[in-house]
Amino acid sequence: MSEPVSAMAGASHDGIVRVEDAGLHGMITLRGDLSSAKLKKAVKAAVGADVPAQRMIASAGEKSVAWMSPDELLLLVPYSEVGDILSGLETALAGEHFLAVNVSDARAVFALRGGQVRDVLAKLAPVDMAHDAFKPGDFRRTRLAQIAGAFWMPDNETIMIVCFRSVAEYAFNLLKTAALSGGEVGYHNA
């Protein structure tokens, strides 16, 4: 059996920010009634964080849970723990109407790092990236140029991006182009 590899095999680019393939990430799509006490308890047990509010992400250590839609969450966990977490969800949600699917290998994750991450993403996504409009803990599921994607800021100088693996090379090239030196917008600088 072959070993899993990330979509861009560790590729990186330095421009006004660093763009890098963030490696393998475990991801579970969880669909169900987000107001269900049973689902909330199962999520807390799985990732150590509460179900977040709309357009937010909640984290506990290296695990997170992101709001994707009114009936969908994305659990971000260590790649090696996906099987155990899925088993735990199956047990905890027995009798509940839900769907939990391992989507780890169907996604790619990129990290933007540096003081101008807001400028880079503002070129690609129809999201207000001003400091008072998008903060660490916020989460957006949107478009990055011509592709679907989602992103969040763990801190003020890092943006994590998730997209489909099938468009990973296109996404990486978009991010590299947006990060070219001399392409500073300047509006979002602290």
Image (spheres, rainbow, N blue to C red):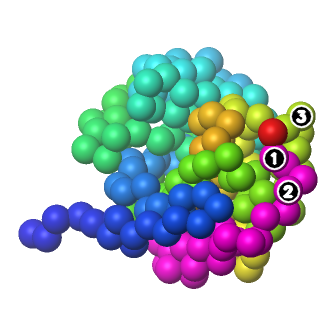
Name which residue type carries label 1.
Asn
Q: Nearer the viewer, residue 146 or 17?
A: 17
Q: Which residues are magenta?
A: 163-189
Residue highlighted by disc 2? 186
Q: Position of residue 25 (x, y in %)?
A: 39, 50
Disc with the residue nearer the chain's start (2 vs 3): 3
For residue 102, above or below residue 175: above
Q: Quadrant of residue 72?
A: top right
Distance between mark 3 and mark 1 Cα atoms: 12 Å
Question: Of circles 3 and 1, which is in front?
Answer: 1
Residue highlighted by disc 1? 189
Q: CB under 8 Å between callouts 3 and 1?
A: no
Q: Secondary structure at mark 2?
A: loop
Q: Secondary structure at mark 1?
A: loop
Query: Residue at left 81%, top 46%?
Result: 189
Residue highlighted by disc 3? 132
Name which residue type carries label 2.
Gly
Q: Nearer the viewer, residue 181 or 124?
A: 181
